[in-house]
Amino acid sequence: MTTVRINASDAVSIETSALIIGVHTTPEGPRPAPGGEGLDQALDGRLAGILTTVGFTGKAEEVVKIPTLGALPAPVAVAVGLGDAPQDGAGDGYDLETLRRAAGAAVRSLAGTASATLALPARTAAEAEAVALGGLLGAYDFTRYRTVGDRKPPVGELTVLSGAAGAEEAVAHAATLADSVTLVRDLVNTPPSDLWPARFAEIAQETGGEAGLSVEVLDEVRLKEDGYGGIIGVGQGSINPPRLVRVAYSHPEATRKVAFVGKGITFDSGGLSLKPSASMDWMKSDMGGAGAVFGALLAIARLGLRVNAVGYLCLAENMPSGSAQRPSDVLHTYSGKTVEVLDTDAEGRLVLIDGIARASEDEPDVIIDVATLTGAQIVALGWRTAGVMANDDDLREEIVRIAGEQGEGAWGMPLPAELRKGLDSAVADIANLQPERWGSMLAAGIFLREFVPTGVRWAHVDMAGPAFNKGEPHGYTPKGGTGALTRTLVAVAERYAGNGTSAQAV
């Protein structure tokens, strides 16, 4: 695993395998950003000319390697684009997401390198944290199942150059976040043959216990006895029975409580409403919501936040078999309400409603559920932007803002009243699907809202696209599992704990 440390040394004197600097695009050509001036001096002012010769412009996330030819201890320098320089007096310095992505892109290009030093702008603790986090996340690679080929290992050690006050604590914070995101990425990338509901629950017990979390696991017998009809219904078609995992963290000085609920479908075939094969090969990622919730709880505990937090991992495998639930079945859910199942591929909402109903018994200040819920989210918002719905407008917009601060794209979406009628059932309290495709992401949110008790602040985040990158790596985002929304949930908890940058809690 890649490690990170802080160092206030000069960029041109530090022993390292590669030196990473930031470069801006200007009308006069590429120019080094703060932290990179030393390299230009070591090259006798020729850096801009060298970069121009190789066609480097400095646009965001552009990366080029150049030999230093003995001008400094590092044999290789990596220039990464930061785009235009911040305007004088504008804001508080560099955009943090720009720094994260630049660091990630540069470190990703150095796979197989023993060490790298990040001489990107890090004049404040926040900038130092952004550089460290981007570098650590960019170093990620999932190699567990690789046995042949010339796959290069990620960079072993990163050094962030910064003398800013609080930089050491900020980089340690980044390392904790990166550890959690890395775990979530690993879980999402693990094939369903090695990650079924009971195995996920075992990982939660093992890893959560080490972090000081309280972990309770309800097996299929307990789920049935206690009336978790949604989770049982989805999982009954698989030889791998479902689980509900409750992970909890408490702080003796906490005055507020947050509850997170994650969809954890370890593989989604669609059930009897079978998916087309082209839509099924990446459905190992359908537990990304539960992964994000678990990763967030781990980080909250390791950071020692002054908040109480509880997470529910709603785990099931959605498979077709003689014991699978059928379209037209009616489920008796934990809330006491009944649901007519019109489509067994609308299964995520069925496990979530049991988790939401159970989470409300903890009497939290807020419930946030996170799920790879609908293909309609991808149609509406694309692969990188999650949809946020809520029964409270202020809560919805605050989550969107927090996600944006973390570099995790999110967009506030409505819950139109007229869509509720499409969920009417002739035989049960509600149907799990509306007959029309239009607005189906919003209808799913409306369905979930029906199971939130009156007076409970609740938000739903649909991250079907952001949880899994089917395209090429970019910035600090790898191909495959991304760990999306983990950092946003931690930041929400920090707001409630009073540890965040905003004085007002969500």
Image (cartoon, rainbow, N blue to C red):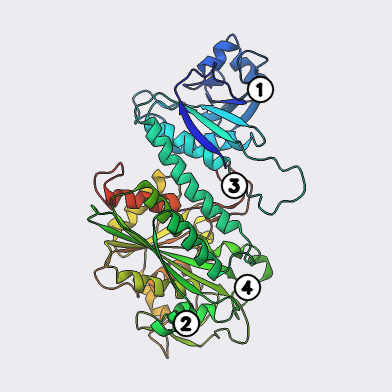
Q: Specify the amino acid type for callout 4.
A: Lys
Q: Specify the amino acid type for callout 3.
A: Pro
The reply to whether callout 1 and callout 2 are in contact (CB within 8 Å) is no
Q: Specify the amino acid type for callout 1.
A: Ile
Q: Report how far apart the C-alphas of labels 1 and 2 lie in the structure.
A: 62 Å
Name the residue nearer the viewer: 414 or 189.
Answer: 189
Q: Is residue 284 left or right of residue 403?
A: right
Q: Which residue lies furthest to the bottom in this view?
A: 427
Give the mark, 1 or 4, whose residue is nearer the N terminus: 1
Q: Mark 3 points at which residue?
A: 478
Give the mark, 4 or 2, whose residue is nearer the N terminus: 2
Residue 66: image tag = 1
Residue 28: image tag = none
Q: Mark 2 points at which residue?
A: 221
- Is any part of residue 438 visible from this angle? no
Q: Name the residue under label 4.
A: 275
